[in-house]
Amino acid sequence: MGLLSTPKRKVGCAALVGAAVVLVQVWLLSTPNPGVYRRFSVCSLCGLNRSTVDYQVPATRWTLSSSREDTESPYSAAYLQANGPPHEHDFVLVSSRGNGVYCGLGEGRPLRGAADQPERAELLGFVLGYEDDPELQRVYAEKLLVIPSAPALTPESRKPLEGQTRPSVLGPLDKEIAQFGFEADVDGQVIAFDHGLKAFLDARARRQTQ
Ligand SMILES: [Zn+2]
């Protein structure tokens, strides 16, 4: 019996290998660029775009080599031009595809959209040019890209309202940062709107130490 079973086993193995080869061929034919995995990401602070290509063993995440390319967004160009605070880039995935992934979506999609808005880039340049306190500059740099909407910067909003000193665009901007950047309650948002980000942060710090 043992002598007869050996050829049968060989035939069985050959059939399995053949089936596996066919499956891999079908997968390779149905997958665009097998082994090439592309990732698009954006820095959550300065809005720099990064495109990474990983050359992987097909159907695995085993990366053999990688290449990457950084491209400026309107926001990152404004950050650079306004000499924004130095930072370690924090790249967040926007999307990915290739090597078995057809359309991977990441948390960085809204950030990518915000970084592409020229209005937001202009606002960043204006705020970093106006505010000279390094600590506040850092808060603006960290939060302005992540808030869902940025107030419009107009010739009028660059000027203070009557009886005030800071540009009027900062009221809605500081409120937005307090609300979405620090999850402030209504009282905190009112402080930020009326008195500015510094007053809000000071009040917040006082509450935390009580
Ligand atoms: Zn960055």
Image (cartoon, helix red, strand yellow):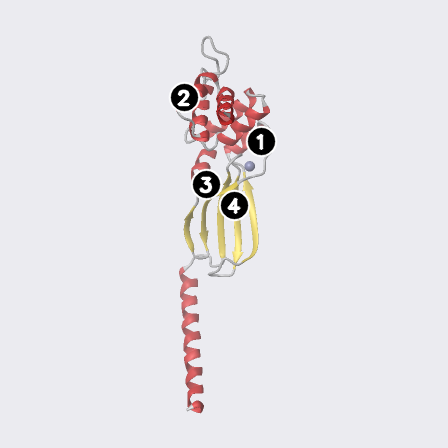
- Spatial CA distance of label 4 from label 1 is 19 Å
Q: Which residue is mark 4?
A: 51
Q: Is 67 placed left or right of 33 in the picture?
A: right
Question: Residue 49, position in %: x, y?
Answer: 52, 40
Q: Identify which amino acid the numbered label 4 is placed on.
A: Ser
Picture layout, residue 5 above or below residue 168 = below
- Which numbered circle lies on residue 80? 1
First along the sequence among labels 2 and 4: 4
Distance between the Cα atoms at labels 2 and 4?
A: 42 Å
Task: First in sequence, mark 3 or 4: give its number.
Answer: 4
Residues at circles 2 and 4 in contact by the CB criterion of under 8 Å: no
- Mark 3 vs 1, N-terminal side: 1
Residue 137 in view? yes
- Label 3 or label 1, whichever lies nearer to me, is 3
User: Residue at position x 50%, y 37% from top?
Assistant: 44
Tell us which disc is closer to us: 3 or 2: 2
SS at mark 1 in the image: helix
For the residues labelled 3 and 2, the Cα–Cα distance comes to 30 Å
- 117 or 134: nearer the eye? 134
The answer to the question of whether label 3 and label 4 lie on touching residues, with beta carbons closer than 8 A, is no
In which of the image's four quarters is ligand 1 placed?
top right
Cα separation between marks 1 and 2? 34 Å
Identity of the amino acid at label 2?
Answer: Asp
What is the secondary structure assignment of the residue under circle 2? helix
**Residue designated by label 3:** 108
Residue name at image x 46 percent, y 37 percent: 111
The residue under label 1 is which amino acid type?
Leu
| Kind of residue at badge 3 | Gly
